[in-house]
Image (tube, rainbow, N blue to C red):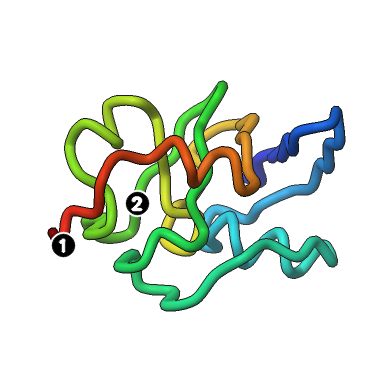
């Protein structure tokens, strides 16, 4: 079952696409021709961070670049996040700025 993902950027820009159950938000966005920032693709750098506004995701593995406080505030690493229902996700540089300090010290 596919899920509809809507990405929100600052300035009222939105893009919507579908994600297959076995693909990450980053992979689904790329398939739809939407470019999102990323680096490691393993959940260790936070370059692909988004903030879940509505819906539910699961990370394929523990998101090492997010601490417990970040996860409690609905931050997700889109390179390892899979949608479990339709989602609205805020993305862009302002989202990354909102993260706490690096869990790597």
The residue sitting at 38% across, 40% down in the picture is 99
Q: Position of residue 29 (x, y in %)?
A: 71, 59
The residue sitting at 48% across, 63% down in the picture is 47
Q: Answer with left or right where residue 18 lies relative to residue 46.
A: right
Q: Outermost residue toward the left?
A: 105
Q: Which residue is mark 2?
A: 59
User: Mark 2 or mark 1, which is nearer the start of the sequence?
Assistant: 2
Q: Quadrant of residue 5?
A: top right
Closest to the observer, 2 or 31: 31
Q: Quadrant of the N terminus?
A: top right
Q: Answer with left or right where residue 53 lies relative to residue 62.
A: right
Up-down: is 52 above or below 66? above
As helix, strand or loop, the secondary structure at mark 2 comes to: strand
Closest to the observer, 34 or 83: 34
Q: Quadrant of the C terminus?
A: bottom left
Q: Which residue is mark 1?
A: 104
């Amino acid at each position: 079952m596919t899920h509809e993902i809507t990405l929100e950027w600052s300035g009222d820009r939105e893009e919507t696409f579908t994600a297959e159950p076995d693909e990450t938000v980053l992979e689904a966005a790329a398939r739809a021709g939407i470019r999102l920032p990323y680096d490691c693709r393993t959940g260790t750098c936070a370059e692909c961070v988004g903030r879940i506004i509505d819906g539910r995701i699961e990370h394929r593995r523990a998101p090492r670049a997010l601490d417990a406080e970040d996860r409690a505030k609905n931050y997700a690493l889109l390179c390892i996040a899979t949608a479990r229902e339709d989602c609205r996700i805020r993305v862009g540089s302002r989202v990354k700025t909102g993260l706490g300090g690096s869990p790597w010290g």
